[in-house]
Image: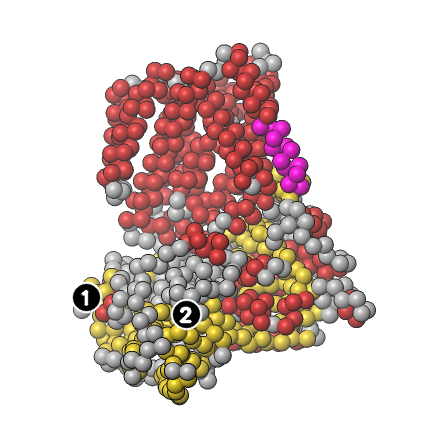
Amino acid sequence: MVHWQKSLISFVFLSVMLAFAYLQTQAPAARADTSLDYAALSRHVSIIAARPHPIGSVANREVRDYIVEYFESLGLETEVQKATVVYRHPFQPESATAIGHVENIIARLPGTSRAAGKPVKDLVLMAHYDSRKDGPGAGDDASGTASIMEVARIMAAGPAPVHDVIFLITDGEEMGLFGAQGYFRQHPAARDVGLVLNFEARGSYGTSSMFETSKGNAWLIEQLLESIPDLNAGSLSYEIYQRMPNDTDMSISRGEGIAGLNFAFISGLYDYHASSDTPENLDKDTLAQQANYVLASAQHFANLGEWQSATGNKTYFNIWKGVVVSYGQGQAVIFGVAVLLFGLWLFVAALRSGAISWRSLGTGLLSLLALIILVSNVFESLIDYQRTADAGIARLISLGEWPLLAYFVTTLGLVGWFAHALKRGFGKTGIYIVVSLLALMCLLAGRPWLSAVVLVLILIPVLRFIGSRASPPNLWAAALVLWWLLAALALYLAPNASYMFIWPLASVLLGVALLGRYDNSRGRFVVVLASSIIPLILLPPFIVLGYLALGSTMPQGIMILTALSLLLVWPLIRAIGLLADGKLNMAILGAGLLMTAVVVFGRGFDTRHPLGEDLFYAIDVDQQQGFWVSSDVRPGSWLSEFMGKDTSEDNMSRLLPGYEQEVLIRETPLPRFKAATLELSNDQSIDGKRVISLHLQSPVGAEYVNLLFPTDAGISSASVNGFPIVVPGTKTEVDSEIKKADAMKEKDKTQSEAWWRWRWYGLPEEGADIVLTLTADRPFEVKIIEVDYGMPKEAPLRPVDSMPKPYTWSDSLVMFQTLEFD
Ligand SMILES: [Zn+2]
């Protein structure tokens, strides 16, 4: 076989494998063989997600009524659980307290076991009905809610299941998992729950996958695979998710020791918590898949007899859509150790035969280091440049998976070019040109000049050293050694996550062993292709999902993994580059850089991907002044036109002392308004301490109220509607989330620590009662910030390519006031 043939075959082979891998991350076409009514499913979504409906809003109460009426129409015993939930989120600083008034929807389908007098545990199907104020929440989480409603219809019409099935549609998930806390920590029926299936979303399309389980999942996974043969799931995602700060309602049930399985889809991050999370933008196949997952898993678990309690954990992963491999942790360890030993044996044999030496391995590892620095620097510069551009990261996210393709081609070109340069030897001039270009990129991207200096100091000597000594085989050997180490580390830390390293390594090592047995080039080429299959099945979907999950803001990590994966299948990549003596590598690199440039400088925002712009109306109650405020200090054209010439650059501390943030402010005539009241209803002395009772009420029905108490007011205990509130400086109850929280500690350090902040959601119309015990008898101030979602009628109309900026007070009326108590 001549070079161009091998080169072409390898390129086509790689492209086809990657295309297959990408398809794995997409939802399959909606199944026809199901009892689900897809039209009804879409109707539910379009009604629930007709507009934003955050906790405490009128729109949310309408959604609640719609769901309650629907469950009642099915003949299900339906209840609305009103609960006050008070907690301190472990990721927030100590001085942050959250309070939520939730209305959970609970419908029950009685099972046969209870009637027969031999009750078994209840099955909970869970999703949340509230959205954020920033978007209508079609994906998050009307998709889950609608799926559960449709499954309730099917199950209520069918034969009674063995287990009672509870359709739990929680409220207030978005602002702090309030509904789940209200149910699992306060509802008397929660103690009978044996299993929770939770359905969530972080985007608008892509395959739904079962990404989280409770501990001891072996039996659950076996049963789940029986119920959903075409499941998409991987035990690696479970291991990763456990170590991430993300939370869903299942964090609460799992924290209460209840078994659970968690499903979500994550493609289309741009629509997450944004005004574009609309029914039209929610992929129909994804919705259908989610609903089919609910139906299949619910019917299966509800009809099993007694569920088994926690057993060991399992390894499970897809090798193709609908093909899941699973085995126990014990087997994972045995396979893993066997592969590692095989690798060690090959290594020793290669050392003995002189195929590699410690010296060649050393230069190989140095080359690997240089390549990783190269790749990481390119992508770190790129992302830092985007950060300095207006809404640059948002623009990247709006492009979905396209940036990943551009980055991938760039990395493929970089790896090929680098290896080819190793083969030829780096010329001195070449080294200085490349390193200076990289340093220049560093500086242009606005990174600290120190990183450019460090780059020059490390890369120049390393490249000069390896220039004449290293070769591509050294680099490959070093990459295999690194994969071996990563596999060993994964096996040690999380055996059920090690498959992602162990199987690709095993496949390539087998190829290495076989390569030695073939001396004809055709045979060797077949071995090269065959040994690349497993790595190309397992690694690319992980890279795509990794990019979607967290890579859009830190592509350097994902691209280092990509470079290491390409090196793992190096003989294949080398075969691609055979053509035209390495010039093809340069062409690929050039194409990648061009694609990356299009991604970075290309498309702006449009109707489908509107630009998030912050604008809210502020009333300073104390000064009797009205303002338009925006945290976008470099506003887009619409916003800058509206803010006009009278705008001044200012600081949030003008409205809220202690909260430093640059903002644009424009004064505007004050409309008529009614601010919240905090009235003293009782003031007495008990055991030498001053106990005061206050009544908080918001006449405008603000969905979100902040109360700020000075930390030096001497508050020793506090309660809301009789629920105690943990005072900062005292210990909270031990929470399963605390562990995760350690990693996120001190996040909000910028906020003033002078205030104890209560974030209050869904304050009822009749208000709420607060009781404070004060150790000191001195006057103190309370600040109230009322956030009433929705703009006053004087607000400007947004153009279609602009949306409220997520995670801000955008499109709200915000009232600031200070009250004195003496
Ligand atoms: Zn959600």
**Residue 199 visible:** no
Is residue 573 toward the left or the right of residue 298 in the image?
left
Q: Amino acid at mark 1?
A: Ser
Q: Which is more N-terminal, label 1 or label 2?
A: 1
Q: Residue at x 24, y 38 (%)?
A: 450
Q: Residue at x 30, y 64 (%)?
A: 752
Q: What's the magenta region?
A: 328-340
Q: Are marks 2 and 1 in contact (CB under 8 Å)?
A: no
Graded by Cα atoms within 10 Å as few (under 14), some (14 to 19) or many (20 or more), the crowding at tag 1 reads some
Identify the residue position indicated by label 1 in the image. Answer: 648
| Nearest to the observer: residue 534 or residue 784 | 784
Q: Position of residue 262 (x, y in %)?
A: 59, 55
Magenta residue check for 331: yes
Q: Position of residue 136 (x, y in %)?
A: 47, 66
Q: Secondary structure at mark 2?
A: loop
Identify the residue position indicated by label 2 in the image. Answer: 727
